[in-house]
Image (tube, helix red, strand yellow):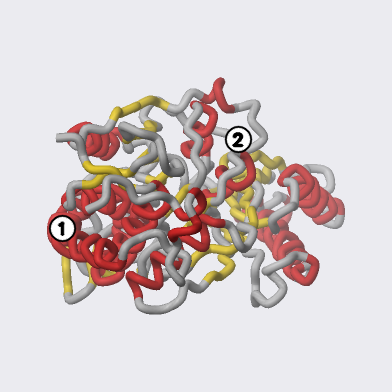
């Protein structure tokens, strides 16, 4: 084995016909090493699933990750997100909860000789609420394997991805190699609600020449994705006894009229898709969701209050402040046309995501390198697609001047019941990541 596998960009004269700097025999050895470790990798993923890392409860899973990275010899940085450190950044989202347990963990590998290109392997530890447990086939935090599927909340979104990052590095180590460049293995929180976790890593100084995020993307590369805004609307009514309902004002019914106005705004934004590159062919790129509603106190009383929480997406290049102004104008116009709301306008509060979308420009060296790695691991070319969901990739692309490759395994049921991830897909994606590391960062023998 050679002492160093040089990155393609620094020594093109030795490149192979496909552009790769990796010896085919070494590439096959890397894929075989991934396969050798897949049973341990799946067991590790199951251990992560057993730790319910819901918002505000991420610390146990992050302790697990800190130990995992420390045991592998990485320099570990574990800290709670400090709102004061990031609140003035343009990528910040407003926070309405305590960040005491909003922990980030970063494990850093440093080589003996920095000859390759640096890399961030990023993943989010936080998961969304599981809903009624009796609607799951098995308890959500008791991982079950059935055939090729690994079940459990967070299995696909995205604890399998976090494990893939760790075990791709392990596969190289098993062969006696380590990256010949700095690699930051990041386990962040807040991806499901603000994106402030990845942002806090950037503000703390973690930067690299490329980043990979193994989100559940069906073995494809994300070319572009939307920005997202979260907001809560509060409506006040006039409570009376139901026998005199006509003399009061039903806050729940008034809220429904505002929801209809927001649906019209959603339709208007979707009608603008032709002006936004990569989104022209999507059927419905802008999605509005009424994710939570509360209101009233008593079945026989006209409700005095109602709140509803919304999530709406915006196109890349749209400033969330401009989109927020349109949302507020929509609600204001709807209120003016309503006999009760005209004198009792709704209140709006931004309580989470307030972020731009991004486009990953085509043709970067990082994308070409991933394309070669994917072709070796999968035996077919890498496809890209556009997704109408939030991704932490925006932090790297918009603010870190860093190509971010969001690319991960086949899943089903994410954010729903019986969430699951394909084990065969995990192995293939882990292999592609390991091959990417080997070519992008270069390799050097581990110093025994």
Q: Position of residue 377 (x, y in %)?
A: 33, 70
Figure label count:
2
Q: Which of pointers 1 and 2 indicates the residue nearer the eye?
A: 1
- Between 216 and 252, the residue placed more toward the observer is 216
Q: Which mark is residue 37?
A: 1
Say left or right for 37 vs 93. Answer: left
Q: What element carries label 2?
A: loop
The correct choice, above or below, for 428 with respect to 351 in the image is below
Say left or right for 234 vs 82. Answer: right
Q: Name the residue under label 2.
A: 92
Q: Which residue is drawn at 58% across and 60% down?
A: 289
Q: Residue at x 73, y 68 (%)?
A: 270
Q: Which residue is drawn at 40% across and 72% down?
A: 375
Q: What element carries label 1?
A: loop
Say left or right for 272 vs 250. Answer: right
Q: Which mark is residue 255?
A: none
The correct choice, above or below, for 133 with respect to 64 in the image is below
């Amino acid at each position: 084995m050679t002492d160093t596998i040089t990155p393609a960009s620094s020594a093109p004269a030795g490149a192979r016909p496909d552009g790769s700097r990796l010896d085919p025999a070494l590439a096959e050895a890397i894929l075989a090493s991934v396969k050798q470790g897949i049973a341990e990798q799946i067991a590790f993923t199951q251990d992560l699933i057993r730790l319910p890392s819901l918002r505000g409860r991420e610390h146990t899973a992050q302790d697990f990750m800190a130990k995992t990275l420390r045991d592998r010899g990485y320099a570990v940085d574990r800290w709670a997100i400090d709102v004061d450190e990031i609140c003035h950044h343009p990528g910040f989202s407003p926070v309405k909860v305590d960040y005491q347990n909003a922990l980030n963990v970063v494990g850093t590998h440093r080589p003996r000789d920095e000859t390759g290109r640096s890399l961030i392997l990023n993943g989010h530890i936080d998961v969304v609420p599981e809903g009624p447990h009796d609607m799951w086939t098995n308890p959500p935090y008791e991982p079950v394997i059935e055939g090729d599927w690994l079940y459990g909340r967070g299995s696909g979104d995205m604890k399998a991805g976090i494990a893939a990052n760790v075990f791709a590095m392990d596969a190289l180590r098993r062969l006696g190699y380590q990256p010949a460049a700095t690699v930051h293995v990041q386990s962040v929180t807040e991806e499901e609600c603000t994106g402030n976790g990845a942002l806090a890593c950037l503000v703390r100084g973690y930067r690299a020449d490329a980043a990979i995020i193994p989100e559940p993307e069906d073995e494809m590369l994300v070319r572009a994705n939307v920005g997202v805004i979260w907001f809560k609307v509060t409506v006040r009514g006039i409570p009376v006894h139901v026998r005199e309902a006509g003399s009061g004002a039903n806050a729940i019914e008034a809220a429904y009229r505002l929801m209809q106005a927001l649906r019209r705004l959603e339709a208007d934004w979707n009608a603008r898709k032709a002006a936004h590159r990569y989104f022209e062919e999507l059927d419905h790129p802008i999605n509005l969701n009424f994710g939570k509603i509360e209101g009233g106190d008593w079945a026989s009383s006209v409700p005095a209050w109602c709140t509803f929480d919304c999530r709406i997406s915006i196109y890349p290049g749209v400033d969330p402040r401009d989109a927020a102004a349109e949302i507020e104008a929509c609600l204001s116009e709807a209120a003016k046309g309503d006999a009760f709301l005209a004198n009792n306008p709704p209140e709006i509060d931004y309580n989470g995501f307030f972020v731009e979308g991004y486009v990953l420009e085509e043709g970067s060296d990082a994308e070409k390198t991933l394309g070669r790695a994917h072709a070796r691991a999968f035996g077919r070319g890498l496809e890209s697609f556009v997704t109408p969901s939030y991704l932490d990739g925006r932090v790297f692309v918009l603010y870190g001047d860093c190509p971010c490759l969001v690319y991960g395994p086949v899943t089903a049921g994410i954010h729903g019941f019986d969430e699951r991830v394909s084990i065969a897909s995990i192995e293939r994606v882990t292999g592609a990541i390991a091959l990417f590391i080997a070519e992008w960062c270069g390799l050097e023998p581990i110093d025994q």
